[in-house]
Image (cartoon, rainbow, N blue to C red):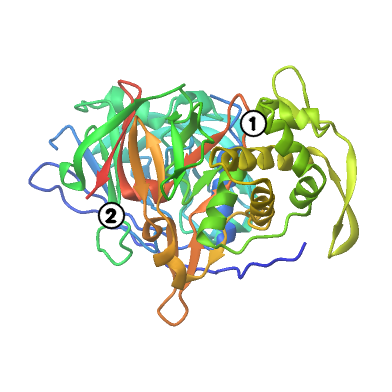
């Protein structure tokens, strides 16, 4: 299938970290910067979260300040060992392990572009040596576990278990300006099954509250890019009160979202609630393909022609319409037309193969997992139009248009920058409150005035029940809403960022 996208390449910018002295309010600020990435790396960062989907101010406050570049990713400095060895890491709420490159990484190009941990230089190092491997969408890292002291801001966390990466199997790691990742998720999703650094930080240090909070500055030209506060919140970076929602289960920072609106129109996709996670390690917002396609249609992104989707609409569209009009439950419609079957827990494909023409080959074998998924999306779209009392012909025509707006399998989509002012707001309903994002907030602009490019902030991610449907609210959402991660009371709080 031909690539209809103009892929945007963001320039790489060297990251420098500066440690600032403690201020009069006893809050330590450590400078972070945010790296500009191309679409390939944005997509890879998001796919990296999918690997775990089957698992579940005063002296007692530490502030990590962030510096921002191009609104894509945020980094900060930590130290490991005695004397301290400095590393730049992503503070990632979508994972739970800490890893940095090892001095024993000999055969990965990536390791030669980053700081490496030298255990022989640390007097507080303890050998463990258990092997581990972490898989990401664009590659993987592998290595072994070690133990040493880790310093974050004012805090020294003693005897922290982390992973020394000896192989980084992706060129993406080479061009990224971060050395490693520091996970802030729950222990339940730790690949190493080690105690996450935040647990030890709260246990070993006298923090006021078992919370940490993020403020991400979306102004790429601002000197201060944002901050992470360990043990509390910085009141100057949010307006009003936070809306709190409980954590659904320990693992990700996961909660229930009530609905999603495009403009002022509810999609109805989360009518019975959707799972959502807040992930500081993901740049964009990931959601179900059916809804992202509707967003793409509303904002005019360049899509790809989905032959499977159009095949379902052409052959089964009228039948799907009739079944829904007759009141058949939406989750049973696709099984009744023979595209999906119920395996005892959920509706899945029958596993029959079909041939779909491809412009790059005479044909490609596509199992009907794709047709089942296309049917389920079509049912969602038709059902929504039925609630708006649209005619059959208009609905079928609209669904065909949505087929042409299906998100790229690679992820993000480019868009005409001149049309931003005409795009609708999108709204997440969380804790019975509406959280709006304007086009200026969910569209990423890159480049200078002569070469400005725009990228949609939405990418597709389909997670089947019972884990899904699932939304991942990344830095685009967190930039608009100051976020509190309350470990003590197992809840999340959102307030308008200031």
Mark 2 highlights which residue? 31
In the image: residue 179, left or right of residue 60: right
Query: Which image quadrant is residue 158 in?
Result: top left
Q: Where residue 64 sits: x, y (%)?
A: 27, 46
- Badge 2 marks a residue whose secondary structure is loop
Instruction: Kindly report the distance in space between the C-alpha atoms of the residues bearing marks 1 and 2.
Output: 40 Å
- Front residue of 107/390: it is 390
Q: Where residue 472 sits: x, y (%)?
A: 49, 40
Quadrant occupied by the N terminus = bottom right
At horizontal 37% and vertical 33% (from top left) the residue drawn is 430
Quick one: label 1 or label 2, which is nearer the N terminus?
Answer: 2
- Badge 1 marks a residue whose secondary structure is loop
Vertical placement of residue 16 versus 492, above or below: below
Crowdedness of circle 1 by 10 Å Cα count: few (<14), some, many (20+)?
A: few
In the image: residue 350, left or right of residue 330: right
Crowdedness of circle 2 by 10 Å Cα count: few (<14), some, many (20+)?
A: many
- Residue situated furthest bottom in the rendering: 450
At horizontal 64% and vertical 31% (from top left) the residue drawn is 464
Camera sees residue 354? yes
Query: Which image quadrant is residue 378 in?
Result: top right
Camera sees residue 101? no
- Residue situated furthest top in the rendering: 344
Q: Nearer the viewer, mark 1 or mark 2?
A: 1
- Residue situated furthest right in the rendering: 362
Mark 1 highlights which residue? 464
In the image: residue 79, left or right of residue 281: left
Vertical placement of residue 70 versus 321, above or below: below
Q: Where residue 190 sits: x, y (%)?
A: 52, 29
At horizontal 62% and vertical 52% (from top left) the residue drawn is 106
Q: Which of the labelled discs sits on residue 119, or is there none?
A: none
Q: Where residue 460 sits: x, y (%)?
A: 59, 47
């Amino acid at each position: 299938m031909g690539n209809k996208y103009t892929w945007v390449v963001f320039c790489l910018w060297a990251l420098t970290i500066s440690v600032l002295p403690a201020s009069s309010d006893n809050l330590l600020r450590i400078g972070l910067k945010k790296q500009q990435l191309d679409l390939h790396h944005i997509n890879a960062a998001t796919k990296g979260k999918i690997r775990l989907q089957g698992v579940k101010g005063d002296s007692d406050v530490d502030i990590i300040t962030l510096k921002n570049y191009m609104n894509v990713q945020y980094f900060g400095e930590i130290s490991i060992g005695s004397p301290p060895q400095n590393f730049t890491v992503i503070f990632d709420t979508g994972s739970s392990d800490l890893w940095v490159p090892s001095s024993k990484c000999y055969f990965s190009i990536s390791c030669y572009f980053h700081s490496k941990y030298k255990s022989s230089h640390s007097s507080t190092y303890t050998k463990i040596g258990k092997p581990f491997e972490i898989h990401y969408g664009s590659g993987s890292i592998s290595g072994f576990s070690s133990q040493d002291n880790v310093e974050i801001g004012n805090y020294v966390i003693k005897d922290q278990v982390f992973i020394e990466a000896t192989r980084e199997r992706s060129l993406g790691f080479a061009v990224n300006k971060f050395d490693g990742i520091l996970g802030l998720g729950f222990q339940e999703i730790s690949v190493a099954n080690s105690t996450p650094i935040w647990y030890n930080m709260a246990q070993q240090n006298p923090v006021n509250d078992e919370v940490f909070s993020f403020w991400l500055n979306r102004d790429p030209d601002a000197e201060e890019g944002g901050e992470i506060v360990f043990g509390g919140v910085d009141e100057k970076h949010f307006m009003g009160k936070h809306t709190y929602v409980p954590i659904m289960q320990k693992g990700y920072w996961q909660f229930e979202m009530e609905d999603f609106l495009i403009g002022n129109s509810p999609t109805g996709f989360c009518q019975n609630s959707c799972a959502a996670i807040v992930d500081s390690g993901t740049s964009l917002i990931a959601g179900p393909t059916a809804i992202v396609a509707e967003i793409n249609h509303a904002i005019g992104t360049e899509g790809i022609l989905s032959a499977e989707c159009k095949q379902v609409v052409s052959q089964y569209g009228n039948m799907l319409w009739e079944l829904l009009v007759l009141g058949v439950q939406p989750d049973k419609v696709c099984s009744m037309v023979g595209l999906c079957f119920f395996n005892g827990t959920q509706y899945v494909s029958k596993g029959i193969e079909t041939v779909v023409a491809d412009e790059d080959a005479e044909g490609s074998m596509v199992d009907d997992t794709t047709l089942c998924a296309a049917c389920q999306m079509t049912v969602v779209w038709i059902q929504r139009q039925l609630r708006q009392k649209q005619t059959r012909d208009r609905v079928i025509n609209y669904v065909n248009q949505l087929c042409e707006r299906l998100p790229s399998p690679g992820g993000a989509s480019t868009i005409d920058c001149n049309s931003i002012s005409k795009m609708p707001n999108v709204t997440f309903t969380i804790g019975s409150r509406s959280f709006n994002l304007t086009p200026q907030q969910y569209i990423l602009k890159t480049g200078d005035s002569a070469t400005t490019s725009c990228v949609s902030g939405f990418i597709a991610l389909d997670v089947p029940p019972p884990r899904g449907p699932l939304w991942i609210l990344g830095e685009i959402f967190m930039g608009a809403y100051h976020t509190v991660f309350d470990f003590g009371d197992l809840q999340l709080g959102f307030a308008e960022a200031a």
